[in-house]
Image (tube, rainbow, N blue to C red):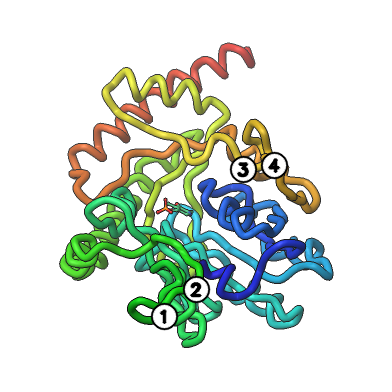
Amino acid sequence: MVLLALGVGSGDEVITTSNTFFATAEAIWFVGATPVFVDINPQTRNIDPNLIEAAISPKTKAIIPVHLYGQPAEMRKISAIAKKHKLFVIEDCAQALGARGGDFALGELSDAVCTSFIIQKNLGCFGDGGAVVTNNAAMASEIAKLRNHGSPKRSHHTMGYNSRLDEIHAATLSVKLRQLDRWNDRRIEIAKQYDAALAGTSLELPYTLPGYRSVNHLYVVETEARDALQSHLEAQGIKALTHYPIAIHQQEGFPFGRPARIAGSLQHTERSAARVLSLPMYPELTDEEAKQVIEAIVAWDKTQAAKTQKVAG
Ligand SMILES: *Cc1c(COP(=O)(O)O)cnc(C)c1O
């Protein structure tokens, strides 16, 4: 709806990342525009701002950075590029409500922030929901129409969608919103426990940029032996999922009969997709449970190290 409100559509290009939930690119295709995929920075796993300028063409209209796993993308750099080339910036904040950059707030350096309240996000409603936040009054009123069958006022219609936030969800969110910072703080506390206890293992741990507040929607480690570690944890009764094992450009059927452009190599995106594993992460996780996860990983890592030594010997 933000893309529609900004008039982005057929023949336009929108720069984003392939290392994200499918919905980010789906929105671009949905309005008839062309997603242009730029590689990630392998440390932050967010779009690499240093690769964006080379991906810009005369058709480029917008950039959609994703604040993946709860860590803001490098918005200062992204917004400077957007200003220089007169592009819109739309933040995909579905995983990062409550996060901050080193010296910027989410929403401060963009045209709009889109978020999701589906139950598993850091702030979930009673089922499905989402929101757009903007300080652009024209866009706000356009979206208010679009979400309600194109209705600017009762009994009058242009064209739009059924995309309202039901009141039961809004009421749930109003109550839960008060707890968001506390829940995010707990996620950060769990992340610190993982960081400290897993630092000596062979796993690559999440990297948070200096001064950034990542709200750890997910705690995603990387290892060559991802599948083996996942099975090992599963056998111990620990569910570890993968986000996202198939990048968007790797989906079967990509690009679904629609336009798409890959800007340069997506080698870091592909490498990450093959290696990611999300450890249990939610505010209700107890210290005892986090310890069980840690112990299971450390034990597995020791057997791995022994195997490697044998091979080397
Ligand atoms: C969850 C999510 C979305 C979409 O959320 P819906 O509520 O299913 O529309 C978009 N982008 C990212 C990065 C997400 O994690």
First-in-chain label (2 vs 1)? 1
Residue ID for mark 3 = 248
Q: Where residue 152 is drawn, which disc sits there? A: 1
Q: Marks 3 and 2, how far apart in space?
A: 33 Å
Which of marks 4 and 3 precedes in the sequence?
Answer: 3
Q: Are marks 2 and 1 in contact (CB under 8 Å)?
A: yes
Residues at marks 1 and 3, CA–CA distance in whole angstroms: 36 Å
Q: Secondary structure at mark 2?
A: loop
Could one spot residue 144 in this view of the protein? no
Task: Please tell me whether mark 4 or mark 2 is closer to you in this view.
Answer: 2
Q: Residues within 10 Å of mark 1 (few under 14, many from 20)?
A: some
Q: Amino acid at mark 2?
A: Thr
Q: CA distance from mark 1 to mark 4?
A: 35 Å
Nearer the N terminus, badge 4 or badge 2?
2
- The residue pinned by badge 2 equals 158
Mark 3 vs mark 4: in front: 4
Q: Earlier in the sequence, mark 1 or mark 4?
A: 1
**Which mark is nearer the camera, 1 or 4?**
1
User: Residue 207: x, y in percent?
Assistant: 50, 54
